[in-house]
């Protein structure tokens, strides 16, 4: 169902009347974790100023250590929804438990399935059974074929509004948190008809690489870029090393505009 061979035409995913996959590149930005209304609002205000429509934030956080901040849960989704309403933004947030998919429909405009859950087949089936766009991230060690099959699970359940997100894979290289597989972008565009995003924050894990990798992503044909922004990254409850602060983010957006790759 997701194969380009069977369906040559690009799938456009419409999120509150903003289309992804129509040739205009988009940005998804927001904090790694939702921490408070004020924190999310500070970012949302900036998105509004920059003309960006997609606000991300993690409420259910799949953390490597059980002792790390696990997210605010449903309360975090409510914060995202309230802030998004005030600033006319769409919400993208990760759901980790199949039984929370129905609940999430009240709060999010896009259900994110994270890298650690790319092959959580019950979660994929649950996301496939609802009428809500899904952003599916590539698993930490998933091949492109496995990634495409995960998308197929969602489509097979009846939900064709799927967007793929390359977020870096595990390799022996330690200079970056993961290795951004940039060639996955044109391969996924050739093999499927789905929109393709690149998450520059989780792939690199390095603030100094966000702009060059975002440029590369747009140049190679990604439909959009995801990046994390926090009003005060030094005190962030997760991913403090690679989130941009607000002036850095404004500079990131204006540098992308200047490059001519993002309009
Ligand atoms: C995220 O986007 O919040 C996240 C946890 O990313 P990933 O699933 O790609 O690690
Ligand atoms: Mn993060």
Image: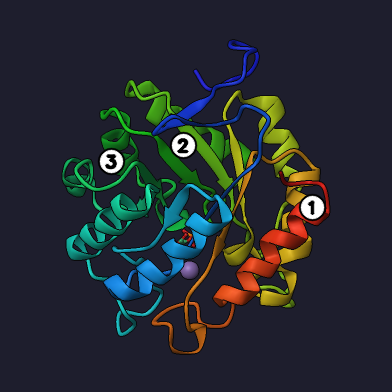
Q: Residues within 10 Å of mark 3 (few under 14, many from 20)?
A: some
How many marks the image carries: the answer is 3
Image quadrant where residue 227 sits: bottom right
At label 1, counting other C-alpha atoms closer than 10 Å, the crowd grade (few under 14, some 14-19, many 20 or more) is some
Residue 67 in picture, x, y percent from top left: 30, 85
Above or below residue 176? Residue 99 is: above
**Mark number displayed over residue 122:** 3
* Residue sitting at x 79%, y 63%: 212
Q: Label 3 vs label 2: CA separation?
A: 11 Å
For disc 2, the neighbor class at 10 Å (few under 14, some 14 to 19, many from 20) is many
Q: Earlier in the sequence, mark 3 or mark 2?
A: 3
Q: Which mark is residue 150?
A: 2
Q: Which mark is residue 216?
A: 1
Choose top left, top right, bottom left or bottom right for residue 83. bottom left
**90 or 145: nearer the eye?**
90
**Distance of label 1 from label 3 (alpha carbons):** 34 Å
């Amino acid at each position: 169902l997701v194969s380009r061979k069977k369906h040559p035409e690009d799938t456009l995913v419409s999120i509150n009347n903003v289309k992804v996959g129509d040739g205009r590149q988009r940005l998804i930005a927001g904090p790694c974790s939702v921490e408070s209304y004020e924190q999310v609002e500070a970012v949302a205000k900036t998105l509004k100023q920059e003309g960006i429509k997609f606000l991300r934030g993690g409420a259910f956080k799949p953390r490597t250590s059980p002792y790390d901040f696990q997210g605010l849960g449903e309360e975090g989704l409510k914060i995202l929804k309230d802030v998004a309403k005030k600033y006319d933004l769409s919400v993208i947030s990760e759901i980790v438990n199949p039984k929370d998919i129905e609940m999430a429909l009240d709060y999010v405009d896009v259900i994110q399935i994270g890298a650690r859950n790319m092959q959580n087949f019950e979660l994929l089936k649950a996301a496939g059974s609802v009428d809500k766009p899904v952003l599916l991230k590539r698993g930490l060690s998933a091949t492109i074929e496995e990634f495409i099959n995960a998308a197929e699970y969602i489509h097979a359940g009846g939900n064709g509004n799927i967007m793929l997100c390359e977020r870096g894979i595990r390799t022996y290289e330690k200079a970056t948190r993961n290795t951004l597989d940039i060639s996955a972008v044109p391969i996924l565009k050739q093999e499927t008809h789905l929109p393709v995003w690149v998450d520059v924050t989780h792939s690199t894990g390095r603030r100094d690489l966000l702009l060059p990798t975002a440029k590369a992503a747009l140049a190679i044909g990604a439909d959009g870029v995801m990046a994390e922004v926090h009003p005060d990254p030094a005190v962030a409850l997760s991913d403090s090393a690679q989130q941009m602060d607000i002036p850095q983010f404004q500079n990131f957006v204006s540098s992308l505009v200047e490059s001519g790759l993002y309009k």
